[in-house]
Image: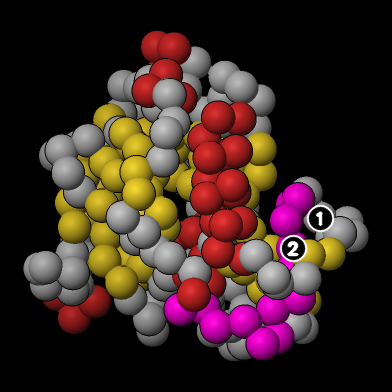
Amino acid sequence: MRARVSSQILYRGSGSTNIFGGKFSYCLVDHTSHKNVSNYLIFGSTPSSTTTKAPARRTARLDLSLLPPFYAVNIVGISIGEEMLNIPPQVWGVKKGGGTILDSGSSLTFLAEAAYKAVVTGLQRHLVGVKRIKPEGLPIEFCYYTSKFDDRKLPQLTFHFMGGTRFAPYRRSYLINAAPGIRCLGFVEAKAEATNVIGNIMQQNHLWEFDIAASTLSFSPSTCL
């Protein structure tokens, strides 16, 4: 069953493994897409026509016991280019007040203080010389005039899952369009001990497949059409 939907958070309810075989998936279009293009949600197995084959399709552990009723993932680090950022392990540990969830209802990505500072500092190094502006009415700290900025100058940001799986979002998903000629680092600082939230802009242009029975999360690049 496939439905066109708005971005929304999906909770795990009791008995969810008995509904549509305990599987669902969604795909989120670019947030700057035309209004006649929409996200979609599929209940049950994902049709083969929408699935991307390996090596583009990646699978990670989905931990249903960590942060109920949310779908928690075991992120263990973030890298920028070839550099693994120096982020304390407790940021990712649920028992120490951290942990990470995927949230299709939050536009921006929220990171605990230590992770946030490491990420924005690392990205700022590659934006030297790009004029920074103060955003108006946005919860974001770092915005720039980027009309002449070449995205390729910004290194790849990557989320690392326990077990070795990696999620490498598109650059436009973390240097996001805020207004014509203006782009912002799409991160918000959460408190020191807080759940990290990977928001829907970071997830855009990927197909996300949840298998509750198998406790797995698979994802792959997609146009969502």
Disc 2 element: strand
Which residue is at 53% across, 72% downward?
172
| Dot placed on the residue nearer the N-terminal end, 1 or 2 | 1
Of residues 10 and 83, the one nearer the viewer is 83
Residue 151, percent from left and from top: 52, 78
Q: Nearer the viewer, mark 1 or mark 2?
A: 2
Q: Which residue is mark 2?
A: 143
Q: CA distance from mark 1 to mark 2?
A: 10 Å
Q: Quadrant of the C terminus?
A: bottom left
The segment highlighted magenta reads 140-152
Do the residues under discs 1 and 2 have CB atoms within 8 angstroms? yes
Which residue is at 65% across, 65% downward?
128
Which residue is at 53% across, 40% downward?
118
Q: Residue furthest front?
A: 129
Does residue 13 show up? no
Residue 138's label in the rendered image is 1
Residue 114, percent from left and from top: 55, 29
Label 1 crowd (10 A; few <14 / some 14-19 / many >=20): few
